[in-house]
Structure formats: structure tokens, C-alpha cells
Image: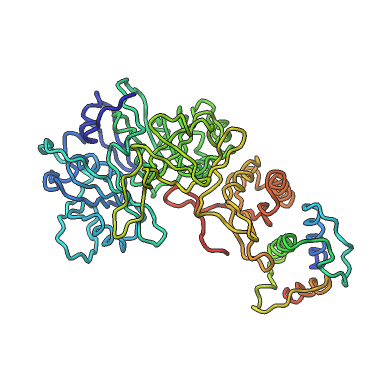
Amino acid sequence: MDIRSEIVDQFTQVAQEQGIPLAPLTDDLALLDSGLDSLCFAIVVTRLEGLLEVDPFSSSEDVRFPVTFGEFVRFYDNAAN
Amino acid sequence: MQQTERTSLWNALSAAGDLSGRFVFGAESSIALSDLLKGSALYGRGEELCGRSVLVTTTNQFTTAWALIELDGVARRIVLCTPDMPLEHLPYVIESADVDAIVTDRTILDLDIRSPLCFCPCSRQIVDGNFDRSVQHQTEWILLTSGTTGQPKLVVHTLSSLAGAIKNSNTSAEGVVWSTFYDIRRYGGLQIFLRALLAGNSLVLSSVQESTADFLARASSLGVTHISGTPSQWRRALMSPSAHLIQPEYIRLSGEIADQAILNQLQTFYPQARIAHAFASTEAGVAFEVNDGLAGFPSSVIEHTPDVDMRVDDHCLSIRSNRTANRYLGTEPPILKNEDGFVNTADLIELRDDRYYFVGRRDGVINIGGLKVYPEEIEAVINRHPEVQMSLVRTKKNPITGSIVVADVVLTEHSSARRDLRALQGDILLLCREALSSHKVPAAINFIPVLAVAESGKIVRSKCVM
């Protein structure tokens, strides 16, 4: 499974688990408008670390948190490559 | 029932009746209880230790057992070293407990101590002869527990406080053979040592050099009928192919929260066994035991436990009885009892449907986005899943919430090979979501082959956030 598909999968699964309606995951979707709250993002990041064996947030002290879904995917893409 | 005063372990064992066929079994050798009364493990030098504060540090529990029988009622103090205490703490212990004699089977202790000490070797062989035991001391037993600063805490007991929950029995306990996964140099193991010895029953000791499977096989061959351990030790035992070898009549759990899953698993595995879980700690002593097969305890226990006063202070269980420790030793020792004589156990309890449940340790709480989470509460839910053997809930550093709950899970042997692990993660998370508020639901379930269990028999909980 590629990184984007894994991320989509985790967004969908966590939203479903938390009973939160998820907005369509387009590249320009602002993460704050996705429907997920901070606990959901925390869960997504933890699970992605387990699945992709990469934690882009720990790679640097001053990482800028991605704002849109597209940035989020690129963030993981860059860290993985 | 009125308890008669127990003057010493040696006297109690002498009065225990016919000791023929009763032994203390170690992993490599055994000794008849009657021989322990007739001879000396201290090369007949027990008299030199009269009235002294004696540190007992041995390489194995077998020799400790002999030394305890010989020293109680003779020494002013017995300071019992735990097997894993770093030797670097010995000078602190020696100073704090005013130690002036050491009983050991070690050849070298490498101590840098200025004060004169009487060294008394401890043998694996009993030599003939004893000494006049008419001079009796009410020996203080000093147990060591791990302190938060690294230095051990020295907890003062007497034989009376240690054995306060053990009923004097005039009836024959024919056929009873005790054993424990615990080391007898810790409070939980010492309780079983005293239960066996005060009634003149045989005792099978565990050994760190022995695997769980080998220990269970040995316990089986020696006909163990009564056996105790922590829930973690029992979970590990049930994973062993030798678990079916023993057929205990009585199983006792203590030292950690006994959740419903482990109680059910034990009852299913050993249908003939009476299963009890006891609430006890080194400081608070044995408070009560629960025999109804259910986790937690009925709320009536708080007010209706004979000889033990209990109250709930800010959700923590506090205990006052003649089984609690007396005080701590050491420079500026912490307060053990409050002004009313109660020991605060720091164990948090919660009342649900007229039953109290242990939810965790006050100092074990983890903070998730400002909300409190007790790992044991979550583990109890995860452990309910039929394919889970044991679990450990911990925090993990997280860039969004600071930290988050994750669970390390060991599966039962038969399940890990055949299951779709992703589906199983989903199952366990579903169970958690049904039973827990959302901040307590683990963000991730990691399947791991084994969880570390410390020498204390308790699951190893890392203090640091990973």
C-alpha cells in the first residue's frame, strides 16, 4: 500500500472509530476542516508511525505542522524518502 | 479468633506438631523441617548474634529460609536483603538499620564500612547442635522496598505484624504443600514462607535460575497444593506448556490488581482450585482477601473486616491494623502512618454497583491532554479479550497531544499464529471503545512476544515517556 492510501485509510478508520463525519480528503482540504479533532490526529500520527516506520515530527525540533491534507501526505512522503 | 502470641519462628515451628515428611525444597536440594530445629545453618554461631542487628544477604532463598528460622527471637533485628538490591546500597542499609552483624553465603562482599561488623557465614549444610535459645528478643524484621530516589526504604515489622493475618491452626494440615512464584525475601513471598512454616507444612521455593516450566514441573512432582503469585506471574505460568502439570487446591494472587480476566482464566484452567486474591503491601500488611471469584471487593469489606480498619481518603484506600508496618528506618524517614495510625496505600479505588475496584496507583497516573488515565484500568479491559494473555499500557510521546496512550499486548500462544492481526487490533480497540472514555482508548495496539516481569513479580512499568 502506498503512503497516500495508508494515510487515507487511517483518516477514514479513526473518523469511523470516533464516530466523526469526515470531509472528502482532497489535497486542498484544511486539516482543521476535515472533522478530525486533535485526539484523532494524535492517533493517526501514532498509527502511521507503526505502519510506515517513520515519524516526520521527530525528525527536527522546528517542524511546521502541515495545514492541508496535501501537505500532510507530502510531509510523510518526504520523511519516508 | 484470639491469636496466641508467637514468640519466635523457631518456637512456632517447634510447637507445630509432627514434622515428619515436611521439608523446605529448593531447586537443588531440600531440608527436613525437623533438622532445621535440631541443627544450625550458621555453623553453630547463632549465640554470637544474640541481640545484634543482623543483615541477611544470601545468594539464594533456600539459605535465607534457614537463617530466618535460626535468627528470629535471637537477633534484635533481621534486615532482609532483597535479591536484586544493588550492593552499592548496602552501606546505607547498614547505617540506617544500625547493623552490627552480617549473615551471608557470599565469599566477598567488598564493603567499605568503617564500623566493626561480625561476619557469620551461612551454610547449605546443617551442622549438629544448637544453642540455648532461652534469651528471647522480640526481633524486628526490616524489609526493603524500592524507594523513589533509588535508595531502598527500610520497613519495620515484627513476626506478629507479619503473621497477623495467618490464623493459628490446631488442626492438622495434612498434605498441604505450599509454593510461591515470589521470592521469600519480599513481603509477598515471606507471607507464604510464614504460612507454611508456622503450620509446619512443606514449602517449595522457586529459583531465578529455573524457567517457569521447570519450576511448575518441580512443583508438580513435589505435590504442591497451595500456590501464590502476582497476576503477571500467573499470566506467564498459564503461557507455559507445564501449566497443566500442577493441580492446586488453592491459588492466591497478590501484589498487583487481579482483573476479571486472570481470575476467569485460572478458574477455567484449574476448575478444582479455590482462588483468592489478597490485598496486601509491605507497609500496609495483609488487609483482606477476596474469595468470590470476582475482581474488586464488596463495599462491605471496608467496614466489616475483622481486626482491620479501612477508610477511603481521596479515593485512596487507607488501612489501620496490627498487621501494618511500624515505621521506616533511615535518615529523615518518610511518615508511614498518619496521626490516627492509618497507612495510606496510594492504591486508588472506585465504587461501582456496591463493589470497589482498584483502578491503579496514585503515582502511576498518566496525563493525556490534561485528563487522568490509570494504565491498569485500560489493561483490565484489554485483558478481557479471549486472545490476550497480558498487556501493558504506557504513554508515548506525541507531537499533537504531548503524549498518548498505547498498549503492548502479548497474545495467547494459539492465537498469534492464525489470526489476522489487523482485525484483532480492531477487535481489541472496539472492546476498549465500548468500555472506556475516548481519551483512555489506546491510539495503537502493538503485538509483542513477551512483557518483562520484574523480580518482584510485577510487570515492569517504565517511568519515562517514550
Residue sitting at x 23%, y 64% = B111
Residue B315 placed where, x, y %?
53, 45
Residue B110 placed where, x, y %?
24, 64
**Which is more toward the observer, A41 or B383?**
A41
Residue A46 placed where, x, y %?
69, 63
Q: Is residue B125 above or below residue B269?
A: below
- Number of numbered discs on residues: 0
Residue sitting at x 29%, y 21% = B170
**Which is more toward the observer, B424 or B9?**
B9
* Left/right of residue B256 with respect to residue B164 in the rendered view: right
Q: Is residue B261 above or below residue A35?
A: above
Residue that extends furthest to the left in the rendered view of this protein = B132
Residue B129 seen in this snapshot: no
**Which is more toward the observer, B63 or B11?**
B11
Q: Is residue A2 above or below residue A14?
A: below
**Which is more toward the observer, B354 or B239?**
B354
Quadrant of residue B8 in the image?
top left
Q: Is residue B39 above or below residue B403?
A: above
On-image quarter of the C terminus of chain B:
bottom right
On-image quarter of the N terminus of chain B:
top left
* Left/right of residue B387 with respect to residue B302 in the rendered view: right
Residue that extends furthest to the front in the rendered view of this protein = B339
Residue that extends furthest to the top in the rendered view of this protein = B171
Residue B91 seen in this snapshot: yes
Residue B305 placed where, x, y %?
44, 30
Quadrant of residue A70 in the image?
bottom right
* Left/right of residue B93 with respect to residue B100 in the rendered view: right
Q: How is the image coloured?
A: rainbow
